[in-house]
Amino acid sequence: MRVETVTQIMAFAVPAIALILLGYLLFLAKKSNWSLLKKNKVFAVLVPLFLVIITVLNIAMNMFNNVVNLYLSSKTSDSEAVELAQENSKAITAEIQGEGIVLLENKNNSLPLEKNSKLNVFGIGSVATTFGGSGSGASDESNNVTVYQGLKDAGFELNPNLVKYYESNKPKKEQQNNFDLTGGDYNIYEPTSLTDEMVKEAVDYSDSAVVVFSRNGGEGGDLPMDMEEFKNGDAGKSYLELQDIELALLEKIKSAGFKKVIVLINSSNAMELGFLEDEGITAALWIGGPGATGNTSVAKVLDGSINPSGRLVDTYAYDLTTAPAYYNAGDFAYLNGKHELGPNIDYFKFLNYNEGIYVGYRFYETRFVDNVTGETDEAAYEKLVQYPFGYGLSYTTFEQKIESSEVKDGQVTVKVKVTNTGEVAGKDVVQVYYTAPYIKGGIEKSHVVLAAFGKTEELKPGASETVELSYGVDEMASYDYVKAKAYVLDKGTYEIKVMNNAHEVIDSFEYEQKETVTFNESPRNSDNVVATNQFDKASGDLKYVSRADWEGTLPTERTKHGQASDELIDLFTNPQYKMDDSAEEIVTANHGLTIEDLRGKDFDDPLWDKLLEQLSVDDMVKLIGYGGFATQAIDSVGLPATVNSDGPAGINNLLTGSTGVQFTSGVVIASTWNQNLAAKLGNAMAQEAIAIGTVGLYAPGANLHRTPFSGRNFEYYSEDPVISGKIAAATVKAAKEDGVFMYIKHFAVNDQEINRLGVATWLNEQSLRELYLKAFEIPVKEGESTGIMSSFNRIGATWTGGYNELLNTVLRNEWGFKGTVVTDYNYRWFMDPTQAVLNGGDLMLNPVGKEPTAAKDTTQGRQALRRASKNIMYTVLNSAAVENYDTSFPLWLTLWIIGNVLVLTTLGTWIFLKNKKMKKVELEQ
């Protein structure tokens, strides 16, 4: 018997028994002329009170049985399996960090340091390390390895006076709530009591100093563009700049006489790092968010045990305000928006993606290119860009050379020979970009676009390895949303380039496309059907940035608040769906099938129709409406319940409190440029999930770093959709092979946290398809994902979780997605469950239920319920859930039943004894 049935019975039986007992008590009281109650005041109060309490508890238990069962059942797991899985996760985290660290500067070969040497460590981040971020992507950090601990464990002798100083100034834990959903803590906690004498003593202790600067982010808020309101912040400076208090510390260290000053950048968000070029800074490492054990690898990079091989996955500009997206990131409202919940709330906010495709390196690598000659104004470029996308140094040197190349059968194939020409073993990254022919006034095109990448194994000095990379010719097509309204591969010369990074060419060859190909009748090779305009209504009336007229289209001031039209307000305030009875009625019948009978069957196998006929409408509403951190059991088809958890950086169930090992931040994973390592991460996440009884994960995050200020950039991979998509695909596919399904999130264009709840995002279809959707397209097609999480925001005026063109036309029809679309946490009125199921959504992420009740009333709605139910069941079937289904009766429910019986028996006995005593008194009288 399932939990729901038992709690339903008890919700009826217990109140009924309580009512009978209460009635009998009143009968006895009246019979005694109320003397029974007058003489037993404690009895008179406690018995009715307990009866009311037990009644309320059982009614509540029935209402929230799903939440209670999820919470209490999660407390039982195989501790040995959990321990083994977590030890593996810790090892993988350290390995990822070791390959993800980026060597930014190494003047005069300042690194590596001598092993087991004495070392001074400065900066509050050395003890209060930022391991990742807050919110659903957070984890329990209590046992994580700090920078200090990592250095100590590696054998470095740390200056004890500095250790004591920073430990005594460490922010108290109550100041840091990693599970808060209101953004990060942006105060600067750098202590100011470091004296010149302490620094002088430090120079005497060791001639080497490490300085740690940390930044954090979190769900629910973006990083401040002005620090005036925060502790030790400077007016006019953003959080991603060093504040005066930090610059003062750095100056004190630089002027003290250290031979080596090494800076560690402990931030997943790209910072302004111009200060690293100062002669007093001898080396710098970007370490991102190192997770539970990553700082052990930071120490190994510092002492040379690991040769850094990470490459940046964001462009690092000297001034973050030079990016066009900066002017359209933040809080922008329709001031005339009104709703019964109040004026000017989240639902009447907007965001304009005026920059079009020119995000990150697509802007910086194109901005100073002559549209006729293709030459770059290097002087102008170097004033803006400090470290290009794909940049990273090594302790050794490499030579890359194209060994062979061909374009055949629609595929570009490049073989690159990589040779270690230095004196230290190491790994190298191979990056292949293309430059497409640009016609001024035609389709917008970035000067370079990442097409493929790979990484060598560790190469000893003098050793070589050939890395083979390939991609489709039609992947170089651009999306023309204005004229062709389809993908277009322009005729002309395509330069295929092997590059050190997005700016430095190593070797190249040309491919000549003889004729323009417009994919408006036949689809690209990877598409199931032709991709045509689906999002015209999301373009708005914006003026988009164009390389044909930089000066006339680049924004020069931040967007102002606006006014919404009546039509727009109507779209914002009313669910966007219509239903009728034009569809065929669903058929219900019992064929004696269970979900296991479909194991190994294709999604389109006709046996699915038979199985679906066994579902009642109530079954479907329950399955769809109660998807908060779980999927429901359905007895009529033998479908087991599942537990689902966040998140991208490790197990983190905000409902049950279950947490796992904290992996590195997503940007560190991407910075490895290693898809095999991403697959190992997927395996580790799956093994840990299964050990604690979870088969579904709300991960990974595939949104882009549209700007460095997004609070959740630590969860996401990069500013580029190709590396984002490839890393996500490897992770998802590996987890799926181990029996865990992943919901890739947040689909789509949820690239900032401010106003995320219903913000109207306006953008053209080219940027939508080439950037923001592509990061999801790749893991759907290559990773064979069976899960997607839609987002809080709107694209144009339509909520993504109920957007037919997004969830059906593009995701399912074009890309061939088979599986479940779950909403983001479904607790706001505009996230209408009926709109969702009618337009391609399947599962409502709400543990207490968000039922698509209106869908029950029409044939169209019931057909939609059936489609959504199939999608959910297909996802569950293709996981470890069915194989590992635990049919045992939950221990907590047994104890709950026993507790109810004991309470009712005790109260009943008490009343019975009082009645017996009363009768005895009557007889004696």
Image (cartoon, helix red, strand yellow):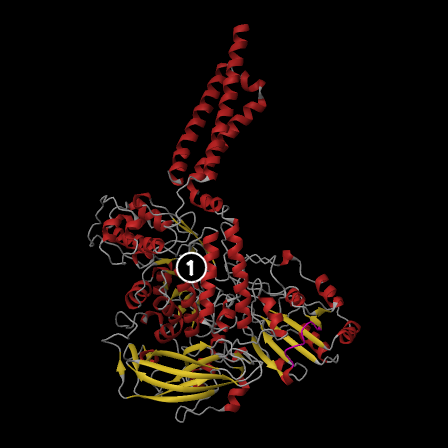
Residue 464: x, y in percent? 48, 82
Q: Residue 113: within the magenta?
A: yes
Q: Residue 351: within the magenta?
A: no
Residue 357: x, y in percent? 40, 78
Looking at the rendering, in which quadrant would you find the N terminus? top left
**Please, is residue 164 above or below residue 324 in the view?**
above
Displayed quadrant of residue 273: bottom right
Left or right: 506, with 160 as reference point: left
Q: Which residue is drawn at 41% across and 33% down?
A: 10
Displayed quadrant of residue 696: bottom left
Crowding at dot 1, Cα within 10 Å, few <14 / some 14-19 / many 20+, comes out as some
Asked whether the viewer can see residue 925, the reply is no
Residue in the foreground of this view, choosing between 333 and 146: 146
Residue in the foreground of this view, choosing between 172 and 475: 475
Asked whether the viewer can see residue 485, the reply is yes
Left or right: 630, with 253 as reference point: left
Helix, strand or loop for the magenta stretch, by majority = loop
Q: What residue type is labelled 1?
A: Lys
Q: Residue at x 43, y 42 (%)?
A: 65
Q: Which residue is drawn at 27% across and 58% down?
A: 602
Magenta residues span 110-117
Q: Which residue occupies the extreme bottom position in the image?
A: 373
Residue in the foreground of this view, choosing between 187 and 885: 885
Residue 252: x, y in percent? 73, 77
Q: How many marks?
A: 1
Looking at the rendering, in which quadrant would you find the C terminus? top right
Q: Mark 1 points at which residue?
A: 338
